[in-house]
Image (spheres, rainbow, N blue to C red):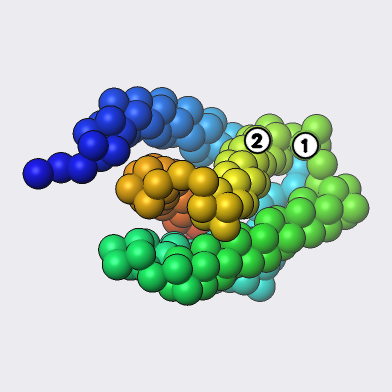
Amino acid sequence: MKQVSEILYQDKKLGFFIYLIVEAVMFATLFATYIIFTPPSEGVQPDEVYELKTVILTSVFLLSSSGTLLVAESGLKHWNRMKIWLGLGLTLLLGSLFMGFEVHEFYKYASEGHTITVNNFLSSFYVLVGLHASHVAFGLAWMILLMLQFKQQKIPESLFIEKHKIFNYYWHFVDAIWVMIILIVYAPYLF
């Protein structure tokens, strides 16, 4: 028999999946826009802007964070507090490292004169990748709130588990979008 919190969270899960579908449509539109404007007919080209080292490092950090989140998830099965802390802490660290490299990437491009107003290619790049970065930043804030709730132990275990599941869906969605960014945005011009 399902626990009460799991039954109560069914509508929230459904609502969250609808939200993720809307987000997927929005990202699909931005990917289509990027594809239309890349490569540009004039001005700076993608292979003049992108840096393989940064793409590899950001990818390793963000994609590894999905694995560390699974550690936290496995800790939830038997309410192993150490495993939950380890998984969430490592996920927060890796996500923060990803954000640091993304901010550095944008700063470097802008300091080289590759700003959002140079051409449609760069505009579509900054909007797509920047929106993804904002989703990661939101996910990091959400994770900090989860960690605070976990530390304070003011909500029942079953409710925390349901909140964590919904967060997992979000974080893995953000990682899936990053894989699409690697394949569509970076890979054609770096490999």
Residue 11 appears at what percent x and percent y? 29, 26
Q: Please report the residue visible at 63 percent of the width from the left and 67 percent of the height from the top.
A: 93
| Residue 79 left/right relative to 133 | left
Q: Is residue 73 visible?
A: yes
Q: CB of mark 2 within 8 Å of CB of mark 1? A: yes
Quadrant (top left/top right/bottom left/bottom right) for the N terminus:
top left
| Residue 81 left/right relative to 18 | right
* In the rendered image, the vertical position of residue 33 relative to residue 104, given as above or below: above
Front in this rendered view, residue 17 or 111 = 17
Farthest residue, direction left: 1
Q: Is residue 42 visible?
A: no
Residue 155 appears at what percent x and percent y? 46, 44
Dot 2 or dot 1: first in sequence order is 1
* In the rendered image, the vertical position of residue 74 relative to residue 36, given as above or below: below
Front in this rendered view, residue 44 or 131 = 131
Residue 59 appears at what percent x and percent y? 55, 65
Rounded to the nearest angstrom, the CA distance separating label 2 from label 1 is: 8 Å
As drawn, the label of residue 127 is: 2
